Amino acid sequence: MTYPAPIPHAQGVQHLCWAPLTGWRWIRANPGHEELPGGRVVRVVTGLRAYRWDRGRVSLFRPRDYTGLIRRACRERCMPVVPASLLLAAAEEAVRRADRIPGGALDSLHLTVELREEAPGPGQRRYCCRLRPVIEPYADRLLPITLQIDHSVAGLETTHHPFFVFGDSRNARVFSPVLSDGPTIARDTVEQLTRMLGFPLREANLGLHAWRELIEKGAVREAFACSAAPLVAPVAVVESPVGKMRVGDGQPGYVTINIRRAMARLVHGAMRDALGWSHLVQPPCSARRGRQTGRLRR
């Protein structure tokens, strides 16, 4: 899945640092020192994104789930766990200070999260967490892609998850391969949204050869894949260790189009958020949105 390159020029980098005597504390953004000092990067966590709504409002999508992912990453590396409230406050401030909030159908402000371990001196340890806004532009067109999968029918890239559709239009049924490591936040979002739109969804514990036979016989009418954006893309060709498989007529299908449109409406606040995934970021009192560019002015 190839998309336009991110634009790493958004302002608003936020630093959280931990020291033995102070614990975790928030160091406000410093434009002159966006890069952290030397150390060892222990984990990079991505997925937390902000979307622009109407009337200048901005929302973080599923921030509590992603802060939970960051906290779990700290535990896995035996690092002090960053408080969830501190992570959420820093994410909100990063969004407020961003120089631009994109407003396209699937454009987002991606807050990349970097955890770093430092050793200021002998026997000393310090940990830092950096939140850096990156503008991610995505084309609004439904361009079919080629998805590469392995023997477990999972995407070769861990953020890509395939879904296969049987049947046409409103009688369609959606099946997804079983994942041994459980669903990711992006996959869970697509699964929940699929059910909300009324499409039956089931996990199918089939092997690669079984899926190949179903696709070649035409039982699979369409396919799509989701990534961490969250972004839903139609799949025209599936590349696997047993060869290439063309899905349906190679064009976006009814289910794919409806899920993608609903995803765009959900993240931009144009449809009811029944699960409470969106978290509105309160702007500064003096902030005013530029009418054409979406820039927050102070």
Image (spheres, grey):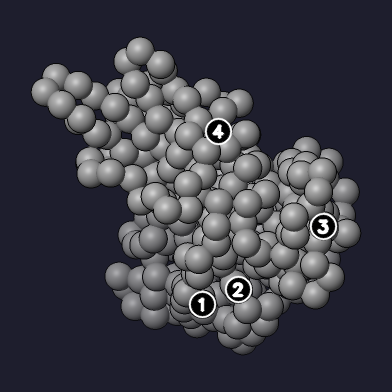
Residue tagged 3: 288
* Mark 3 vs 2, N-terminal side: 2
Residue tagged 2: 138
* Mark 1 vs 2, N-terminal side: 1
Q: Is residue 191 visible?
A: no
Is the Cβ of the residue at disc 1 closer than 8 Å to that at disc 4? no
Kind of residue sitting beneath label 2: Tyr
Disc number lying in front (1 or 3):
3
Where, by quadrant of the figure, is residue 241 drawn? bottom left
Kind of residue sitting beneath label 1: Pro
Label 3, residues with CA under 10 Å away: few <14, some 14-19, many ≥20: some
* Mark 1 vs 3, N-terminal side: 1
- Per the model, the C-alpha gap separating discs 1 and 3 is 29 Å
Q: Position of residue 70 (x, y in %)?
A: 46, 35
- Per the model, the C-alpha gap separating discs 4 and 2 is 26 Å
Q: Position of residue 219 (x, y in %)?
A: 61, 72
Residue tagged 1: 4
| Residue placed most toward the observer, 171 or 137 | 137
